[in-house]
Amino acid sequence: MKKVVLIYDNRCSLCRGSMKWIELHAIKKDIFEFIPCQSEERKLRFPWMEEERCLQSLQLVFSDGKTLTGDEVIPEIISRLKGYRILSVLFKLPVMKSVLFALYRKLADNRYIISQFIKPLIPE
């Protein structure tokens, strides 16, 4: 599996905490590269990606430039995690795709509210 770049909202403690969790459970130490949406690095490396787009949902960029957004990112992340890879098969089922989309949208749309409850646990 090749390294992928995961772009996330650094102002969101839920997002920052999720990136830490993903980093801790990755199958290899360097399989993910994490870049905050608001960073200069993201703007330089991915100038075609609008900030509004990456603030709205996770972005996963492959080495060939292919990009997945939002709920499409979850199965790719899971396939790169120790002990969770088998779950990636479930996300290929049509009914799971619908559930995942609805759940992801709900979380993404309310992430700042959710973050208020976990903010003390994830330092800025």
Image (cartoon, helix red, strand yellow):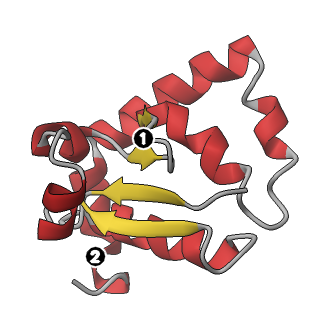
Q: Looking at numbered disc 2 in the image, what kind of residue is underneath it?
A: Lys
At 34% from the left and 82% from the top, the residue drawn is 122
The C terminus sits in image quarter: bottom left
Label 1 vs label 2: CA separation? 33 Å
At 38% from the left and 33% from the top, the residue drawn is 106
Q: Looking at numbered disc 1 in the image, what kind of residue is underneath it?
A: Gly
Q: Quadrant of residue 80?
A: bottom right
Instruction: Say which mark, if any, is on residue 119.
Output: 2
The N terminus sits in image quarter: bottom right
At 32% from the left and 66% from the top, the residue drawn is 35
Q: Is residue 6 above or below residue 53?
A: below
Pointer 1 local density, CA inside 10 Å: few below 14, some 14–19, many at least 20:
few
**Relative side of 90 to 45, left or right:** right
**Relative side of 16 to 56, left or right:** right
Residue annotated with mark 1: 65
Image depth: mark 1 or mark 2 in front = 1
At 28% from the left and 43% from the top, the residue drawn is 110
Query: Where residue 55 sits: x, y (%)?
Result: 20, 46
Q: Nearer the viewer, residue 103 or 24?
A: 24
**Relative side of 43 to 106, left or right:** left
**Relative side of 37 to 60, left or right:** left
Pointer 2 local density, CA inside 10 Å: few below 14, some 14–19, many at least 20:
some
Residue at the farthest top position? 94
Q: Nearer the viewer, residue 26 or 124?
A: 26
Mark earlier in primary sequence (1, 2): 1
Q: Quadrant of residue 91?
A: top right
Query: Where residue 7 sits: x, y (%)?
Result: 34, 56
The reply to whether callout 1 and callout 2 are in contact (CB within 8 Å) is no
